[in-house]
């Protein structure tokens, strides 16, 4: 029988929580040195619990726990910094980031670079006015750290770089392949692909193209799993596009 291990004061964020029995929670947590873990927070739903105001998403924490197999027991938690100030649409965006970590990270697989990237994007979502740019930059780096970096070497492998004037179809398992057409969900100009590679996301056209490309890449690696938060974000975006037309109709 493996003896329980005690871990103290580990930097962490809560990704998800769900009720457990009458007064407890099961927490999915990302930690700096122990990767993604699951812990029981006993009595944390009780009105008298000292943890009630601490166990919330997006707040940097230092936690302690007793590790027993796949489900440990939380023994302490305290805020490691001020609240991030995430509000409005950024809350949905941050939950989307949480879902990505929940789906892609393996339990007990330490990924300190991904932990640092997560802390950075959560901080940025709390202070930046450009939520879309924050998310695209995060997705590009996140996929790279996972080992799913986008390839920008033309499939023809002639040793030449992308031609800015050439159109390419991006094939996820191959990279960009030259094509003679300009339309298609995964067709991009060489100029656009060069800008995505250089992370030049200030241009709205490049940002939209990056979003289109990453949607397909992430969907491929999710293997058909649906992200609930992304679905809500897309529905919110569509409703805002339709809103001006609706207001015009109402005024007419």
Image (spheres, helix red, strand yellow):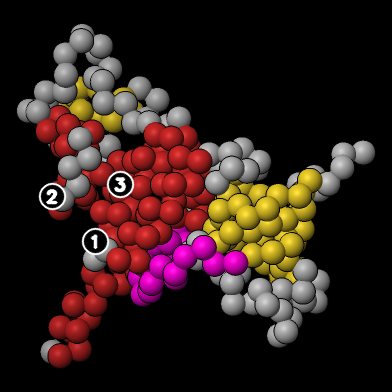
Q: In the picture shown, does residue 87 fall above or below 80? A: below
Residue at horizontal 31%, vertical 72%? 239
Marks 2/3: CA–CA distance: 13 Å
**Residue 111 placement, left or right of 65:** left
Secondary element under disc 3, as helix, strand or loop, is helix
Please name the residue that numbered disc 3 is placed on: 137
Please name the residue that numbered disc 1 is placed on: 130
93 within the magenta span? yes
Q: Which residue is farthest bottom?
A: 251
Residue at horizontal 19%, vertical 84%? 247
What quarter of the picture does the C terminus occupy? bottom left
Marks 1/2: CA–CA distance: 12 Å
The answer to whether the residues at label 1 and label 2 have Cβ atoms under 8 Å apart is: no
Secondary element under disc 1, as helix, strand or loop, is loop
> Magenta region: which residues?
78-96
Image coords of residue 246 (percent x, y) = 22, 81
Image coords of residue 192 (percent x, y) = 16, 37
Q: In the picture shown, does residue 95 fall above or below 214? A: below
Can residue 212 be seen here? The reply is no
Residue at horizontal 79%, vertical 46%? 5
Residue at horizontal 45%, vertical 58%? 96
Q: Which residue is farthest left?
A: 165
């Amino acid at each position: 029988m493996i003896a329980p291990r005690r871990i103290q004061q580990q930097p962490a964020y809560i990704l998800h929580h769900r009720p457990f029995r009458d007064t407890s929670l099961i927490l999915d947590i990302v930690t700096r040195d122990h990767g993604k873990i699951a812990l029981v927070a006993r009595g944390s739903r009780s009105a008298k619990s000292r943890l009630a105001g601490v166990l919330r998403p997006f707040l940097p924490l230092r936690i302690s726990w007793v590790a027993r197999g796949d489900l440990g027991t939380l023994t302490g938690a305290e805020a490691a910094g001020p609240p991030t100030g995430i509000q409005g649409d950024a809350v949905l965006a941050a939950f989307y980031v949480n879902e990505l970590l929940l789906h892609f990270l393996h339990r007990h697989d330490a990924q300190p670079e991904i932990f640092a990237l997560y802390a950075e994007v959560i901080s940025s979502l709390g202070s930046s006015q450009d939520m879309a740019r924050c998310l695209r930059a995060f997705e590009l780096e996140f996929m790279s750290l996972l080992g799913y970096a986008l390839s920008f070497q033309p499939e023809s492998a002639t040793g030449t770089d992308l031609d800015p004037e050439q159109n390419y179809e991006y094939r996820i398992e191959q990279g960009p392949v030259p094509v003679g057409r300009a339309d298609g969900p995964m067709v991009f100009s060489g100029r656009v692909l060069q800008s995505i590679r250089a992370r030049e996301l200030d241009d709205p056209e490049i940002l939209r193209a990056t979003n289109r490309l990453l949607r397909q890449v992430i969907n491929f690696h999710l293997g058909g799993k649906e992200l609930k938060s992304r679905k809500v974000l897309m529905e919110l975006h569509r409703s805002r596009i339709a809103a001006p037309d609706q207001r015009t109709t109402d005024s007419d």
